[in-house]
Amino acid sequence: MILLRALGFELRPPLPMDYMPGYLGRAWQDVTDAAEDYDSWTKEEREEYGVLPGGMDTGMGKACRTKVIQVSCKYYQIVNFFPARAIALGSLYVTLLENGLNVPVDVSQWAKDISGRKVDFEDFEEIVQLLKPTASHDRPNIPP
């Protein structure tokens, strides 16, 4: 084990689900135009106004989690060829579109802002193209 760590092998590779809460939080601020910083609120204020501590417990969070699990379990091509950050960002984007939420016009800038410039835009574009449902079927456009 020590030799594996010394050689730089990851014993626990990052998963798309590791990045989803942060990406969802940033995207939610963009989509809702929320300028309020809820982190500075006290616990009592949050409870009074019903502010959830994390976005993963909302309906959109559950939809994002479902999309990531669907991608991770069903489409091995995506999981094998793309990094976890790109999968999380692509899943988030497709989930937002499927639920009728529009992102800003410049998708490349949005992707850079949400991911902190850590996702290659070409990977993101490819994942989105693979995950977008076709007009007649509700399945990704993944070739056999």
Image (cartoon, rainbow, N blue to C red):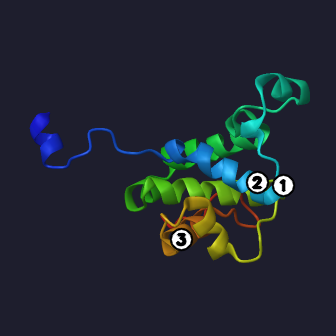
Q: Is residue 1 above or below residue 125?
A: above
Q: Secondary structure at mark 3?
A: helix
Q: Which residue is mark 3?
A: 126
Q: Residues within 10 Å of mark 2 (few under 14, many from 20)?
A: few
Q: Residue furthest right?
A: 49
Q: Residue furthest left?
A: 3
- The numbered disc on residue 32 is 1
The Cα atoms of the two marked residues, 1 and 3, are separated by: 26 Å
* Number of marks: 3
CB-based contact (under 8 Å), mark 3 and mark 2: no
Q: Residues within 10 Å of mark 3 (few under 14, many from 20)?
A: some
The reply, left or right, for residue 108 in relation to residue 43 is left
Q: Nearer the viewer, mark 1 or mark 3?
A: 1
- At which x and y percent is residue 112? 58, 68
Q: Amino acid at mark 1?
A: Thr
- The residue nearer to you, when weighing 139 against 91, is 91
Q: Is residue 91 above or below residue 61?
A: below
Q: Amino acid at mark 2?
A: Gln
Q: Residues within 10 Å of mark 1 (few under 14, many from 20)?
A: few
Q: Is residue 96 above or below residue 45?
A: below
- The numbered disc on residue 29 is 2
Quadrant position of the N terminus in the picture: top left
Q: Residue at x 77, y 28 (%)?
A: 42
CB-based contact (under 8 Å), mark 1 and mark 3: no
Q: Residue at x 82, y 48 (%)?
A: 36
The disc, 3 or 2, on the residue closer to the chain's N-terminal end is 2
Q: State the image quarter where residue 33 is shown.
A: bottom right
The reply, left or right, for residue 44 in relation to residue 83 is right
Q: Nearer the viewer, mark 3 or mark 2?
A: 2
CB-based contact (under 8 Å), mark 2 and mark 1: yes
The Cα atoms of the two marked residues, 2 and 1, are separated by: 5 Å
